[in-house]
Every structure is written in structure tokens, then in C-alpha cells.
Image (cartoon, rainbow, N blue to C red):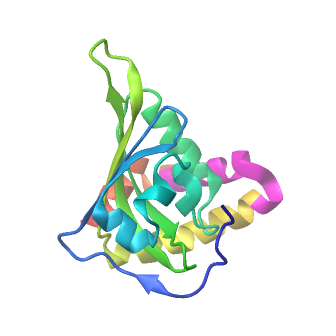
């Protein structure tokens, strides 16, 4: 499936909306709720079996997804502000919680994500930060953007989790 060309159309979740999806170990969607389909503008048939990155917006730096995958592959949950791309080229921001789904023997059998309406403060701060990280990635790669992010957190005296939580409020 060809990726849509991004537009400036912004869609917002309602305060009580929750987007839910599950993926297999390779990141292919195995479940998505109605709100996910509505805001992403895809049908269930188009989403099930498709890599979750079908909704990855080009404004998202790779380092954010590296951090996400590093955490969930170690059975640690993560929260993140994510800008997603709808099928029609529009975009929507989410405050995402991503965790590993564990089988009865404790092995990872897939991944589970619940997303809700993000704060405007989080969108603003992360939008600016992600633009800077993307710029750094273009010239120095993901390692350089990771160093910038770590240096920024150290300078602010907070962990990644503390920063993200403070932005959501």
C-alpha cells in the first residue's frame, strides 16, 4: 500500500477517546478498535495484517521508535507523544502507552497500545523537539539524535519518562 502524501489537515481525538491496537511480534496489526479506524481513515480489512508503521508520519524521528522498541522488547512499558498519518494525508497526535503482551510462560507474544488525546503542551514541545531530532538524524543519523536527546534530558535533570509525564500533566 502506498503511503499518503502528508497534508496540513489535523484531526483531534475527543477527551474520552481511546485508540487501541494489538500487533504480533513483527509489528503487524492483529486488532484495532473502531476509533483507530475512524481517525486513521482505514478499514479493518486494510489494517489487519499490515505493519503498524502504516500510520507513521514522516515528521516522527527514528530515535523515538528505537527508544520505544528497546523498552517494550525488555517488557517495559513506555509512554510517548506520537504524530500519526491518516490514509487521506491528515495527521493526528496521540499520547501513547505501549506494552508487551505476555503469554502464560512470560514470553512476549505481541504488543499492545492504548492511545488517548494528548495535551496541547505536549504536542507543541514534542513537535519542536521532533523537528530538531529529525534535522539531526538527516545529518548525523540516529546515533546523533539519540545523543542530543540524552544530553537534553541530562541538562533538564529529568528522565525520558519524567519529561513525557510532565508534558501530559
Please name the residue shown 17% across and 70% down the image. 16
- Estimate the x, y position of residue 38 in percent, counting from the top left: 36, 72
Q: In the depicted view, which residue is nearer to us: 47 or 161?
A: 47
Q: Which residues are magenta?
A: 138-153
* Image quadrant occupied by the C terminus: bottom left
Frontmost residue, 134 versus 13: 13
Dominant secondary structure of the residues highlighted in magenta in the image: helix
Asked whether the viewer can see residue 155, the reply is: no
Residue 74, quarter of the rendered image: top left
148 in the magenta segment: yes
Determine the residue positioned at 49% across, 68% down: 83
Q: Is residue 100 left or right of residue 130?
A: left
109 shown above or below 168: above
Q: In this view of the protein, can residue 62 be seen by the observer?
A: yes
Residue 90 location (% of width, % of height)? 52, 80
39 up-or-down from 139: above or below: below
In which quadrant will I find the N terminus?
bottom right
Query: Between residues 38 and 118, which one lies in front from this camera angle?
Result: 38
Q: Is residue 116 above or below residue 22?
A: below
Amino acid at each position: 500500500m502506498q503511503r499518503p502524501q502528508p497534508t496540513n489537515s489535523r484531526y483531534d481525538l475527543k477527551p474520552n477517546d481511546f485508540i487501541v491496537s494489538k500487533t504480533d511480534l513483527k509489528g503487524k496489526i492483529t486488532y484495532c478498535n473502531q476509533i483507530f479506524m475512524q481517525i486513521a481513515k482505514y478499514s479493518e480489512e486494510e489494517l489487519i495484517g499490515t505493519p503498524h508503521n502504516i500510520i507513521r508520519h514522516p515528521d516522527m524521528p527514528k530515535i523515538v521508535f528505537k527508544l520505544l522498541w528497546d523498552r517494550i522488547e525488555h517488557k517495559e512499558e513506555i509512554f510517548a507523544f506520537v504524530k500519526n498519518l491518516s490514509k487521506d494525508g491528515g495527521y493526528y497526535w496521540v499520547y501513547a502507552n505501549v506494552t508487551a503482551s505476555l503469554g502464560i510462560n512470560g514470553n512476549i507474544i505481541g504488543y499492545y497500545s492504548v492511545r488517548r488525546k494528548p495535551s496541547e503542551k505536549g504536542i507543541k514541545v514534542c513537535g519542536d523537539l521532533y523537528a530538531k531530532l529529525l534535522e539531526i538524524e538527516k545529518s548525523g543519523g540516529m546515533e546523533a539524535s539519540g545523543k542530543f536527546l540524552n544530553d537534553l534530558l541530562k541538562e533538564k535533570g529529568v528522565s525520558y519518562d519524567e519529561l513525557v509525564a510532565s508534558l501530559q500533566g
